[in-house]
Image (cartoon, rainbow, N blue to C red):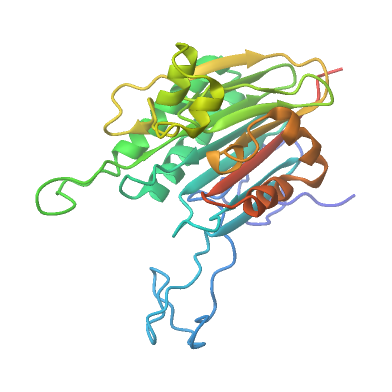
Amino acid sequence: MDTLKCPECFAPVAPEDRFCEACGRNLLVRRTPLGGPTGPAQASCILCGSPDIDDEDYCTQCGRHQPSARDRVEYTLGAVSGVSDRGKRRARNEDSMAFGHVAGKGVAAVVCDGVASSERAEQASQAAADAAVDVLLNALIDTADPEQAMIDAVAASCLSVEQLVEAEPVEAGGRGVAPSCTFVSVLVTETSVTVGWVGDSRAYWLADEDSKQLTTDDTWAAQLVAEGVLTEEQARTDRRAHVLSRWIGADAGQVVPQVVTLQPTTPGMFLLCSDGLHNYRPQPEDLQPLLPCGPEEFVKVALEAGGHDNITVVLVPFAPAQ
């Protein structure tokens, strides 16, 4: 029989152990790295070949900016997988993802899209995702109410983003636009799935039958459609299509997510994504055929369609308890 080892320090552990006695790691919980998964770091300058790359990804010899380790990120944890890509037009990847699972309890996943017009959008999205997934994983451990857990997760995200605001003005004349991001998340157990969101990142249920969009965008255009002022076709081309009516940030006021709980009776997949995907493939029936190829295929489709924005896709499978 193979000896079980701690995934952190590789010390021997017993099947009944909840914590590693050597390093203290919680053996029931696995999650994406704090600060977000990253791609391979640039070893040398893409222009002059110098190995001297500074902390801001600039070559100290020729000054060329190097591809960031966040430009393309792929991460798999058990059956959950995610890909985040800078796209073709953006200077940096301001999307973030975080996910994890608790053995025998369930899975939590979060996607956040940094608001490009705000300060340090990529930091805001990652801080929000990390804070939320920790709350949701703890809720799984404690078997807490999932809808309240989702509300608590967004509150933790808001606090983490608010803490990014500097005490001093960003520039002379006043403070810049506060760090901000959108939020979408799923909390999956054997019997139910709870979805929470703020902004226009989306969650979909994709299955052989009854695929559907689970979230409604928090945008001015979507609000005008709901009020009958615009048709969906008009909203897609309206200049206000991506103007957020709700977001996470120090300037957002009190934020409570929209929350829904489902109890699927058939196997399927929950897809979380930023608008870099659903701008091109908004309909669930257009997304479902891509499932067999994993999140890479969703990102590839968005890139081939133009890749005007950052693209992040996380897939979380669901199979009802027998």
State the image coordinates of residue 220 (x, y, percent, origin top left).
40, 24
State the image coordinates of residue 101 (x, y, percent, origin top left).
66, 35
Q: Is residue 166 left or right of residue 299?
A: left
Determine the residue located farthest toward the top in the rendered image.
Answer: 227
Q: Is residue 307 at least partly visible in the picture?
A: yes
State the image coordinates of residue 210 (x, y, percent, origin top left).
78, 19
The residue at 69%/48% (across/down) is 301
Q: Is residue 30 at least partly visible in the picture?
A: no
The residue at 12%/46% (across/down) is 174
Q: Is residue 192 left or right of residue 61?
A: right
The residue at 66%/28% (across/down) is 204
Question: Where, by quadrant of the figure, is residue 261 drawn?
Answer: top right
Give the answer, above or below, for where 26 lies relative to 188.
Answer: below
Give the answer, above or below, for where 215 lies relative to 40.
Answer: above
Determine the residue located farthest toward the right in the rendered image.
Answer: 1
The residue nearer to you, when weighing 121 against 21, is 121
The residue at 55%/55% (across/down) is 87
State the image coordinates of residue 124 (x, y, percent, origin top left).
39, 43
Question: Where, by quadrant of the figure, is residue 64 drawn?
Answer: bottom left
